[in-house]
Image (cartoon, grey):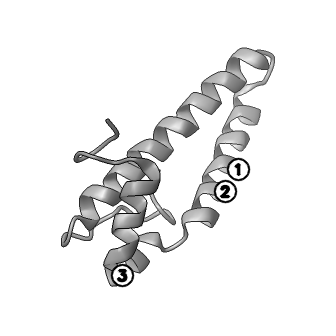
Amino acid sequence: MTTSGRPIREAHGGVTETLSSLQNWVEAVCEMELRRLGSRAPGLDADARAEVARAIQRVVDGLLGDLGSRVARDAALVDALRVFFEFDRVGGKQ
C-alpha cells in the first residue's frame, strides 16, 4: 500500500524513513485485518475479499491523502508521526 496510490519518495530530514515506517505499519494492519476477516468469514468468495481489500485501500488513501508532501513541507509533522506511532528505527517500530 502507498499513500494515495503513490510510492513514498521524499528523501530529507528523516521523511523517507518515517513515512516508510508508517507505510509498513499500515500495510501490516491491513494484512492482519484481511486475515482476520478470512478466519471470521471463511465463506467469502475471492471477489468479495478483493472488494473488501479495495475498500480498505480507499479508507487508507482517504485518511493519509497527500501525507508525504505535507510532511516534506513541515518537519514538525515528521517528529509528530515518530512520537505518535513510536517509530524509533528505519522501516518499523520497536
Q: CA distance from mark 2 to mark 1?
A: 6 Å
Under tag 2, what secondary structure?
helix
Q: CA distance from mark 1 to mark 3?
A: 29 Å
Query: Percent position (x, y) of residue 14?
Result: 22, 64
Task: Name the foreground residue: 83 vs 18.
Answer: 83
**Mark 1 nearby-residue class (10 Å; few <14, some 14–19, many ≥20):** few
Asked if residue 92 lies left or right of residue 49, the reply is left
Relative vertical location of residue 8 with respect to residue 91 in this rendering, above or below: below
Task: Name the foreground residue: 93 vs 45.
Answer: 93
* Quadrant in which the C terminus appears: top left
Residue designated by label 2: 59
Residue designated by label 3: 74
**Mark 3 nearby-residue class (10 Å; few <14, some 14–19, many ≥20):** few
Q: Is there a contact, CB below 8 Å, between mark 2 and mark 1?
A: yes
| Residue 50, quarter of the rendered image | top right
* For marks 3 and 2 on the same chain, the one whose residue lies earlier in the sequence: 2
Query: Percent position (x, y) of residue 22?
Result: 41, 52
Under tag 3, what secondary structure?
loop
Residue designated by label 1: 55
Under tag 1, what secondary structure?
helix
Relative vertical location of residue 32 with respect to residue 55 in this rendering, above or below: above
Q: Nearer the viewer, mark 3 or mark 2?
A: 3
Going by the numbered disc 3, the residue's amino acid type is Asp
Query: Percent position (x, y) of residue 64?
Result: 54, 65
